[in-house]
Image: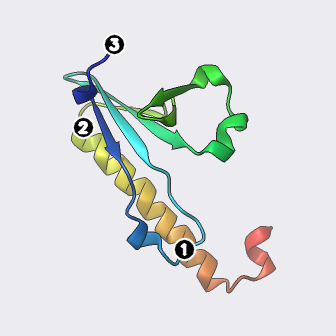
Amino acid sequence: MRNEKDFKVMNFTEADYKHNDIKPSNYLIERVDSYNYVLHREVTRSELTDYDQDRLFLFQNRYYLSCIKHTPDQHTAELVVIGYWEAMKQLNRMKRSLGGSGRWNR
């Protein structure tokens, strides 16, 4: 069994996305060794049926995809997560700028 010190949970801040329709995912960073970190995306309960069970694992009562990215260090993994979160902010800005028009749904 892996030590919990080998994992870091990164949860998005609700306040940053309070008025947004598209919410980002939470992530889990796993330290495999000194030069290998694996990034996992949290899967919501409603998404569970979208994935094969062998691609998921349970950590602290949350489900995660087994691996979405490898990085050489924790700092790089954290930057990747922050980049994903920033992309969600941009999507929300784009959606608001379209004013809810049908163009978003095409």
Q: Label 3 is placed on what type of residue?
A: Met
Task: Say which residue appears at 23% left-offset and 34% top-offset.
Answer: 73
Up the image or down, 90 lies above or below 36; here it is: below
Provide residue 63's location: percent of width, then percent of height: 52, 35
Is residue 47 rendered to the left or right of residue 37? right
Is residue 66 positioned above or below 98 on the image? above
Looking at the rendered image, the disc whose residue lies closer to the viewer, 1 or 3, is: 3
The alpha-carbon separation of the residues under discs 3 and 2 comes to: 20 Å
Residue matched to label 1: 20
Where disc 3 sits, the SS reads loop
Residue at 55% of width from left, 73% of height from top?
Answer: 92
Residue 73: mark: none
Quadrant of res 35: top left
Q: Is residue 41 above or below residue 67?
A: below
User: In front of the other: label 3 or label 2?
Assistant: 3
Residue 21: in sight, yes or no?
Answer: yes
Q: How many marks?
A: 3
Q: Quadrant of the C terminus?
A: bottom right
